[in-house]
Image: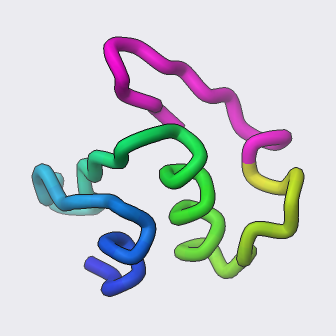
């Protein structure tokens, strides 16, 4: 797991074999972390415009 995840307020919940289940305190930090991990350092309206976000019970699925 990247050292960048905790920098965005995230924590590892589970390793799924081919990925990780991560928890964040809010959707903005989750999106910014995903952008950073994908090599797209938050360029404003990048990741969120191209992916559907679903929030349920404080969780955001990307």
Question: Residue at the location (59% across, 46% down)?
Answer: 28
Residue 6 among magenta residues: no
* Among the 4 quarters of the image, the one containing residue 7: bottom left
Residue displayed at 44% across by 67% down: 8
Within the image, what quadrant is residue 40 found in? bottom right
- Name the residue located 28 percent from the left edge and 46 percent from the top edge: 23
Residues rendered magenta in the picture: 48-62
Q: How is the image coloured?
A: rainbow
Q: How many marks?
A: 0
Which residue does the image show at 35% across and 48% down from the upper left?
Answer: 24
Residue 13 picture location, percent across and down:
13, 51
* Residue 55 relative to residue 50: left or right: left
* Nearer to me, 43 or 38: 43
In the displayed structure image, the side of residue 8 where residue 54 appears, left or right: right
Q: Is residue 44 above or below residue 36?
A: above
| Residue farthest to the top, as pictured | 56
In the picture, measured across the screen, residue 13 lies left or right of residue 35, that is left
Residue 23 lies left or right of residue 25; in this view the side is: left
Residue 35 screen position, x and y as percent: 64, 65
On the rendered image, what quadrant is the N terminus found in? bottom left
Q: Is residue 38 above or below residue 17?
A: below
Magenta stretch: includes residue 56: yes
- The front one of 26 and 61 is 26
Among the 4 quarters of the image, the one containing residue 46: bottom right
10, 39: nearer the viewer: 10
Would you place residue 32 above or below residue 60 in this image? below
Q: Position of residue 34 (x, y in %)?
A: 55, 61
- Asked if 40 appears above or below 50 in the picture, the reply is below
Residue farthest left in this picture? 14
């Amino acid at each position: 797991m990247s050292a960048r995840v905790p920098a965005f307020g995230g924590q590892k919940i589970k390793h799924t074999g081919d990925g990780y289940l991560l928890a964040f305190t809010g959707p903005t930090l989750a999106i910014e972390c995903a952008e950073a991990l994908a090599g797209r350092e938050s360029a404003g309206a990048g990741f969120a415009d191209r992916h559907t976000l679903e929030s349920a019970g404080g969780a955001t699925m990307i």
